[in-house]
């Protein structure tokens, strides 16, 4: 049974989220999300809020936008360097460990 959320991160249909001016993505629980830039066509995502411990999300960029997921162990702990999502088929999967800190589970540069 999948999550059933209206206009948010449903596992079947992704919700769309616009980054704040500070690069924060305010999500509404686990699921799939399309991330849009606040600054035009390119932006850095530095933190995710709205998740609970154990929640998992799959993020992908809005078509034509470049979203750089920024590695910071106190907010977004990635498996290495920053991840630049610049194709609508790029994806990153993150798991929340609480306190608005997410760990990278996987990434796919498909474009």
Image (tube, rainbow, N blue to C red):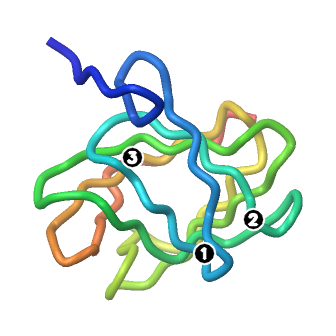
In the picture, which quadrant includes the C terminus? top right
- Left or right: residue 107 compared with residue 55: right
Q: Circle 1 is placed at which residue position?
A: 23
The residue lying toward the viewer, choosing from 107 and 42, is: 42
Q: Residue at x 14, y 12 (%)?
A: 1
1 on left or right of 102: left
Q: Position of residue 7 (x, y in %)?
A: 47, 30
Which one is in front, 89 or 5? 5
Please state the total of marks drawn on the protein image.
3
Please identify the quarter of the rendering in which residue 69 is found: bottom right
Q: Residue furthest top?
A: 1
- Which of pointers 1 and 2 lies earlier in the amino acid sequence? 1
- The residue sitting at 49% across, 39% down in the picture is 33
Neighbor class of circle 1 (other Cα within 10 Å; few <14, some 14-19, many 20+) is many
Secondary structure type for disc 2: loop
**Mark 1–mark 3 contact, CB under 8 Å?**
no
- In terms of sequence position, does the residue under pointer 1 or pointer 3 come before the other? 1
Mark 2 or mark 3: whose residue is earlier in sequence? 2
Q: Secondary structure at mark 1?
A: loop
Displayed quadrant of residue 32: top left
Which residue bears the numbered disc 3? 93
Residues tagged 1 and 2 counted as in contact (Cβ below 8 A): yes
How dense is the environment of label 3, judged by Cα within 10 Å: few (below 14), some, or many (20 and up)? some
Distance, label 2 to label 3, CA atoms, is 21 Å
Give the distance between the C-alpha atoms of the residues marked 1 and 2, in whole angstroms.
Answer: 8 Å
Q: Which residue is mark 2?
A: 38
Percent of width and height locating residue 3 = 23, 24
Mark 1 → mark 3, Cα distance in angstroms: 18 Å
Proximity of marks 2 and 3: CB atoms separated by less than 8 Å: no
Q: Nearer the viewer, residue 70 or 6?
A: 6
Q: Nearer the viewer, residue 73 or 25?
A: 25
């Amino acid at each position: 049974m999948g999550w059933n959320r209206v206009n948010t991160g449903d596992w079947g249909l992704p919700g769309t989220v616009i980054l704040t001016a500070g690069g924060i993505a305010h999500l509404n629980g686990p699921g799939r999300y399309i991330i849009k830039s606040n600054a035009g066509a390119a932006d850095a995502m530095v933190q995710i809020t709205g998740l609970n411990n154990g929640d998992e999300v799959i993020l992908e960029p809005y078509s034509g936008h470049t979203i750089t997921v920024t590695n910071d162990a106190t907010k977004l702990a990635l498996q290495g360097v920053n991840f630049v999502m610049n194709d609508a088929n790029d994806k990153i999967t993150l798991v929340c460990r609480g306190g608005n800190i997410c760990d990278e589970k996987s990434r796919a540069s498909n474009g």
